[in-house]
Image (cartoon, helix red, strand yellow):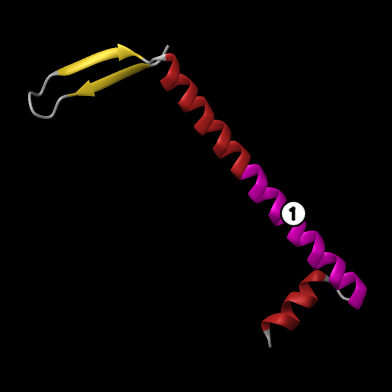
């Protein structure tokens, strides 16, 4: 079990204790949220790339050619 260190700034007293079940649950939930957010961002980036490739294919050009054209306008 992870330890929590609490420091009282007024007295300088340091206390070390085990995490409570609520703290563990909150930490696990935050980690899961971060994982879910990263997965959503990666999926959005992949979807955007797929859409760009589809447009390039419809126009009969490569994705690099399409990006060059768009960058020059």
Q: Is residue 1 above or below residue 31?
A: above
- Give the image quarter of residue 21: top left
Q: Which quadrant of the figure contains the C terminus? A: bottom right
Q: Is residue 71 above or below residue 7?
A: below
Residue pictured at 23% horizontal, 22% vertical: 6
Tag 1 secondary structure: helix
Pick the front one: 27 or 55: 27
- Give the image quarter of residue 53: bottom right
Residue pictured at 68% horizontal, 86% vertical: 72
Pick the front one: 46 or 69: 46
Q: Which quadrant of the figure contains the N terminus? A: top left
Which residue occupies the extreme front position in the image?
22
Residue pictured at 61% horizontal, 44% vertical: 38
Q: Which residue is mark 1?
A: 46
Q: Is residue 57 magenta?
A: yes
- Give the image quarter of residue 4: top left
Residue pictured at 76% horizontal, 56% vertical: 47
Q: Is residue 45 above or below residue 71?
A: above
How busy is the neighbourhood of tag 1: few (under 14 within 10 Å), some, or many (20 plus)? few
Tell me residue 49's x, y (percent): 76, 61
Range covered by the magenta-colored residues: 38-60
Tell me residue 51's x, y (percent): 81, 64
Badge count: 1
Tell me residue 12's x, y (percent): 10, 24
Q: Is residue 4 magenta?
A: no
Tell me residue 42's x, y (percent): 67, 49
Q: Main secondary structure of the magenta part?
A: helix
Left or right side of 15 for 26 = right
């Amino acid at each position: 079990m992870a330890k929590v260190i609490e420091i009282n700034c007024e007295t300088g007293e340091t206390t070390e204790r085990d995490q409570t079940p609520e703290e563990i649950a909150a930490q696990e939930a935050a980690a899961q949220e971060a994982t879910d957010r990263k997965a959503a961002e990666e999926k959005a980036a992949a979807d955007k790339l797929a859409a760009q490739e589809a447009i390039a294919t419809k126009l009969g050009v490569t994705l690099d050619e399409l990006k060059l054209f768009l960058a020059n306008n």
